[in-house]
Each structure stands twice: as structure tokens, then as C-alpha cells.
Image (cartoon, rainbow, N blue to C red):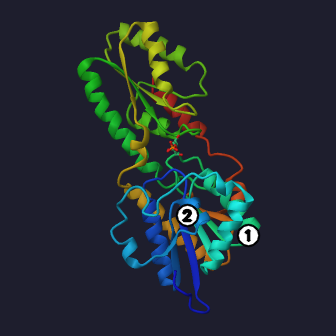
Amino acid sequence: MKEKTPGSSRIGVLTSGGDAPGMNAAIRAIYRAAYELDIEVAGIRRGYTGLIEGDFFRMERSHVVNIIHLGGTILGTSRTEEFKSWEGRQRSAENLQNAGIDALIVIGGDGTFKGAARFNDETGIPTIGIPGSIDNDIPGTDFSIGFDTAINTALEAIDKIRDTAISHGRLFFVEVMGRSSDLIAIESGIAGGAEFLVLPEDKNAINDLCTQLSSSFSAGKRYAIVVVAEGNNPGCSFSIAKEVSDRLSIESRVVVLGHIQRGGSPTARDRVLAAKLGVSAVYAYTKGHAGVMAGELKRSVVLTPFDKVIMGRNKPEQNIIRLAKILTK
Ligand code: F6P
């Protein structure tokens, strides 16, 4: 890192946790907004791991050229235990101070903001968050960067699986990501016209699915697509499929979409969201905000304090669950 000119300002940016399509568009927006305001940007590699190790570089315009359409994150990412410790956060603060970095912008999900909240409060280094996660479970924003791309990726897969399901007359279980959030399953299930949705909290799901399948298969239907939310148990669709196949004596196939949902070129929605939030995060810093996440609620950018963001998880709204129940059976 070069010496800073007196009076100038320098912000660090990192991506942390599960990567999400659109993170690069957010990095680009941050760089370009900062450039307009004469603020230098330091890229921090590999999320909090790079922050703890002082793995920084001065970002130039060339770093953000031709990245808007790229999935993943040019900065790299990590899930690290070390930042959960006071020592890890103190080392990070020292690294930032030594590099003349005045503030930090973090792009990530729930775990990222838990660390950021502590870091902001303990060190006094202004920290601003941007929600980036395919799970869309972060309070303080209607959508997190990456969700729209992930549901479209899942949808494309479901549409393709439907072709072969119909051709063979087969029952398919398609498992989608989302950990504690069912939103990818609900929205890709509705959009993909799934015959049934299995959500982890629905304890009767397998019984209901068997009842429904046995009646539709006896009425002549020969295929079905069941979208399964992975919940906290990735791979759960294998045992669900076995149980249903055994009970109904129907052959089935399982497709676990997995990390495919995390990659790929971001959709226009994700790019626009990333642009709005990236620029807003930089402006929030210049206006003296700290310890807040820039999210979008009802089409307006809203700054929500970290303590509110980390208090819980966004759960699917009742109206979308009702819609899914009406349409996916
Ligand atoms: O939080 C994003 C997410 O993709 C979840 O949907 C999924 O359960 C998890 O990350 C997978 O994590 P990892 O990449 O560490 O296996």
C-alpha cells in the first residue's frame, strides 16, 4: 500500500462468507463512487482471513474493469473462526491502521455482520455492511445480492429436469440451497411449477406428499417434481426420496443443485441492487454513518444498525407461503 496524502481518506473493502453473484458489481460500484469522492479503496483479499493477515492491495480502476458480469468475487472470500475472537479483531484493526485505512465496507451475510458489528463497536473503525447472500435471510433488506440469480439458476435447472421427468415419466426430487431460509425453495418452486415443496419445518410434508402423489399417479400422472429445501441438512433429499419411493413403490431420482446456485453471471436485478447498495455504502461513510448495513426496503435504500440486522433472520412472508401451498400441490 502506498502512503496516503494528508487529509485524504481510504476505505477497505472485503467480501466474506458464501460468495454470491453480484458481489463483483458491488465492489465495482464502491470503487467508482469512492473515486468520484476522491477516496482511495484498498481491496482486502479472502474476507476476514485477509483482514487478519493484512492481505491488502491498492485498488485501481483496472481492477474493476469488466467485472460487472462476473460471478464469484474478485477479492476472494472465506468463513473464518479467527475473527470471532477479540485477538483476531484487534489484529485486523492494527492492520487497517498501519495501512492508513479509515473505514471498512463488508459484503456478506449473517455471519459477516455478526463480526462486523463487534469490530465496529470495539475498534471505532467505521464499518458499513452490504447484504450479499443467495439465502435472502438478512433483516434490513427486501433482497440480498445474489438471491435473484440463485433462484433463476435453480429455475433453469428445474425446467431442464422437467423435460426429462416428463419424457421418462419419473418422480424427481430437486434439492436447493438456503440453509435456514426456505426462500430459494419457495420461489424457485413457484416459478418452476413444482408439484410439491418439502420445507424442513413442515413435519407432515412426507405424509402429505405421499397422499398427493398416490392420488395423482393413480389418476394417470406419470411424473412429478418435488422441490426440497436443504435446511440444515444438505443431502436430506436422498432419504426423503427413498422413503417416498419405498412407500409408494415408485422409482425416483434425486438432483442436489448445491453450489451451482452460488455461481454464474448475476441477473440485471442483482447488478442494479449491487450498484445501489455499493454507492450508498460509500456515501453513508462520507456522511458519518458507522455500524450500519445499507439495504433496500420497498425500493428505497435504508441504513439499518448492525444490532438489528444480526438479531434474527428474514423468514418468508405468510402470503408467499400461502401462494406456494396453493400452487405447488
Ligand atoms: O449461505 C449461503 C449458502 O450457499 C447456503 O445456502 C448453504 O447452505 C451454505 O452457504 C453452504 O456453505 P459452504 O459453501 O460453506 O458449503
| Depicted 161 relative to depicted 18: above or below | above
Cβ atoms under marks 1 and 2 closer than 8 Å:
no
Residue in the image at 46% along x and 7% along y: 247
Image-based side of 102 in relation to 166, left or right: right
Q: Amino acid at mark 1?
A: Thr
As drawn, the residue found furthest toward the bottom would be 6
Residue shown at 66%/61% (left/top)? 116
Label 1, label 2: how far apart the Cα atoms are = 18 Å
Q: Residue at x 58, y 46 (%)?
A: 137
Q: Quadrant of the C terminus?
A: top left
The local crowd at label 2, few if under 14, some if 14 to 19, many if 20 or more residues have their Cα within 10 Å, is many
Q: Give the labeled residue for mark 2.
A: 50
Residue 219: assigned label: none
Is 49 above or below relative to 6?
Answer: above
Residue 14 horizontal/vertical position (percent): 54, 64
Residue denoted by label 1: 123
Q: Which of the pair 110/278 is nearer the observer?
A: 110
Name the secondary structure under disc 1.
helix
Image location (x, y in percent) of residue 277:
52, 65
Q: Earlier in the sequence, mark 1 or mark 2?
A: 2
In the drawing, does residue 223 fall left or right of residue 142?
left
Q: Is residue 135 left or right of residue 156?
A: right
- Tag 2: amino acid: Gly
Residue 19: percent from the left, percent from the top? Answer: 48, 53
Q: Residue furthest left?
A: 167
Q: Does residue 111 sit above or below 285 in this rendering?
A: above
Q: Secondary structure at mark 2?
A: helix
Give neighbour class at mark 1: few <14, some 14-19, many 20+ (Cα, 10 Å).
some
Question: Front-most of 122 and 326?
Answer: 122
Position in image of residue 291 (x %, y %): 69, 66
In the displayed structure image, the side of residue 268 where residue 240 appears, left or right: right
Could you tell me which residue is drawn at 26 percent across and 26 percent down? 164
